[in-house]
Image (spheres, rainbow, N blue to C red):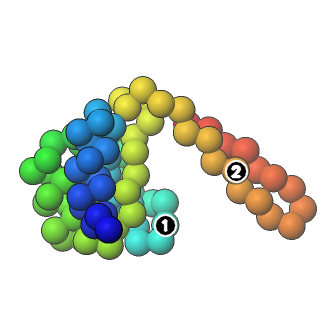
Amino acid sequence: MKTKKELAKSYAEMRFWVLPLEHLGKKPITPNGYKDATRGQEKIEHYWDIQPDSNIGISCEPSGIIGIDFIRNRRKYKFTST
C-alpha cells in the first residue's frame, strides 16, 4: 500500500496540483491554503515529511477539474462545488 506522500507525488505526476489537508479533515494546513498547492516533487516531499498523515487535497482550478461535495445531514442535503 502506498503512503500518502507517495500518492500525492503520483497525483502530481498526473498533473494535479496537490496540498496537505488536516488529518481526517478537509482544511488545508499550509499558511496560504489552496494557494500553496504544488506539482513539485520536492515541495510534496517537504509537506509530507512534516505531516505524514495529512490528507491529500487537490486544487481544482489549476488542475482543470470540478469538485462536487455532497454533505448529508438529518434534514437536508447541502450541495457545494468549487
Q: Is residue 76 above or below residue 80?
A: below
The kind of residue tagged 2 is Phe
Q: Nearer the viewer, residue 43 or 41?
A: 41
Sooner in the amino-acid sequence: mark 1 or mark 2: 1
Task: State the CA–CA distance, disc 1 to disc 2.
Answer: 15 Å
Residue at 13%, 60% in the rendered image: 46
Residue 47 placement (x, y as % from top left)? 20, 60
Structural crowding at the residue carrying mark 2, measured as other residues with C-alpha within 10 Å and reported as few (<14), some (14–19) or many (≥20): few
Q: Quadrant of residue 68?
A: top right
Residue 38 placement (x, y as % from top left)? 24, 42
Q: Residue 32: tell me if it is visible.
A: no
**Are the residues tagged 1 and 2 within 8 Å (C-beta)?**
no
Residue 13 placement (x, y as % from top left)? 23, 39
Query: Going by the image, does 10 lie left or right of 27?
Result: left
Q: SS class of the residue under badge 2?
A: strand
**Which numbered dot is residue 25?**
1
Q: Nearer the viewer, residue 22 or 8?
A: 8
Q: SS class of the residue under badge 1?
A: loop
Query: Going by the image, does 58 lie left or right of 81?
Result: left
The kind of residue tagged 1 is Gly
**Which numbered dot is residue 33?**
none
Work out which quarter of the rendered image holds the C terminus and state it: top right
Residue at 25%, 71% in the rendered image: 51
The residue that mark 2 highlights is: 70
Q: Nearer the viewer, residue 21 or 9?
A: 9
Residue 21 placement (x, y as % from top left)? 38, 61
Q: Is residue 67 above or below residue 25?
A: above
Residue at 18%, 70% in the rendered image: 50
Residue at 45%, 60% in the rendered image: 27
Structural crowding at the residue carrying mark 1, measured as other residues with C-alpha within 10 Å and reported as few (<14), some (14–19) or many (≥20): few
Report the residue that reaches farthest toward the front: 1
